[in-house]
Image (tube, helix red, strand yellow):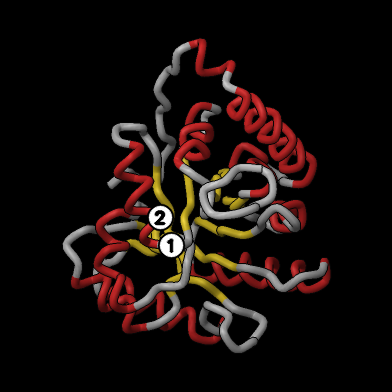
Amino acid sequence: MTSLTSVAMTTYPASFAKDPLVARVAANLALVRARIGASAPDPERVRVVAVTKTFGLEAVLAAAAVGLGDVGENYVDELESKRAQAGATPLRWHYLGALQTNKIARVCECADVICGVSRLRELERIAACEARATLYLQVDFTGAAGRNGAPASEIEGLALRARSLGLDVRGLMCVAAPGDFAARAAFSSTARLADELGLVERSMGMTEDLEIACELGSTEVRVGRALFGPRVSPGTLA
């Protein structure tokens, strides 16, 4: 498994840089980094995770070509397939989706970072796997049915249990409800909770709300449409 330190990218042929998709992703990445630079107290500390769910392998390779070392997938089938197809491309793979108990072993085999951990039984299943990934606990502030994540009141207990199982919990993840007010409340609470628990990573902010997340201490933003355009259909880049 790849560590959560910076990934040294390979040098691609000059002709690869002329690929239209790579050029488009490079231009979009510059815009994303400008948004981060205008809002984060320490822009260099903010990692960009390219969310390639429903996009094809070409999106993964384009992200790698422009220097992004982190890619995220929401579905284990896509994660397994793309990681296998990417071969030796030096990437750190993030699993961003909700964990299904019967698929945890598969996730552990192919993810370097597992986000969205929110239940004790998930921790115990992960601990039973031989592979070891970095974990983020997901906090949910909406209380809405069907939303992944644990209430803030349960996060400390989850972190303590994870540590007792020898798992590497490095941070918290949060998906804010729509709207600036809701985002600001969720991100500030997540950052404060991470500080209280001594966790260094705060995976907060996506295409719509990354400025607020960066302002409030995000160390990692998860962006897909801002890099690749709208998702039209699985495997298609707009």
The residue identified by callout 2 is 78
The residue identified by callout 1 is 75
Three-letter amino acid code of the residue under disc 2: Glu
Is the residue 91 above or below the residue 54 in the image?
A: above
Is the residue 147 above or below the residue 85 in the image?
A: below
Residue plotted at (51% across, 56% down): 201
Q: Quadrant of the C terminus?
A: top right
Gap between marks 1 and 2, in whole Å?
Answer: 6 Å
Label 2 element class: helix
Spot occupied by residue 182 in the image (x, y as percentages of width and height): 77, 73
Residue plotted at (52% across, 32% down): 62
Q: Is residue 232 left or right of residue 131?
A: right
Is the residue 16 above or below the residue 108 in the image?
A: above
Q: Are marks 1 and 2 in contact (CB under 8 Å)?
A: yes
Residue plotted at (54% across, 65% down): 173
Picture quadrant of residue 184: bottom right
Three-letter amino acid code of the residue under disc 1: Tyr
Q: Is residue 66 left or right of residue 159?
A: right
